[in-house]
Amino acid sequence: MTDAVTDDSKAGTIRSVERAIAILKTFTGDSPEQTASEICRKASLNKST
């Protein structure tokens, strides 16, 4: 049971890191500032994320 919880926790952490990287990748020299809506659209994330 503990291993399953640990695996779920790791998977959640990995998803969080992947989302963070996707968000960071939306920032470029041409668009150093963006609204939350723009970031979500470019990173293919829901606003609730």
Image (tube, helix red, strand yellow):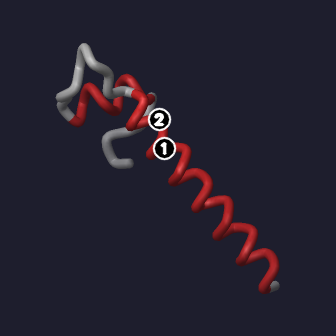
Q: Amino acid under label 2?
A: Ala
Residue under label 1: 19
| Residue at x-position 69% and y-position 67% | 8
Tell whether label 2 touches label 1 (CB within 8 Å). yes
**What residue sits 39% from the left and 36% below the top?**
24
**Image quadrant assignment for residue 3:** bottom right
Please give the residue where the numbered disc 2 appears in the rendered image: 22
Residue 47 on image: x %, y %: 31, 41
Circle 2 SS class: helix
Side (left or right) of 21 relative to 4: left
**Residue 48 shows which numbered tag?**
none
Vertical arrangement, residue 29 with respect to residue 12, above or below: above
The quadrant holding residue 4 is bottom right
Q: How crowded is mark 1: few (under 14 residues within 10 Å), some or many (20 or more)?
A: some
Please determine whether, in this image, residue 28 is positioned above or below residue 8: above
The amino acid beneath tag 1 is Arg
Q: Residue 1, percent across and down?
A: 81, 85
Q: Nearer the viewer, residue 36 or 20?
A: 20
Task: Say which element carries label 1.
Answer: helix
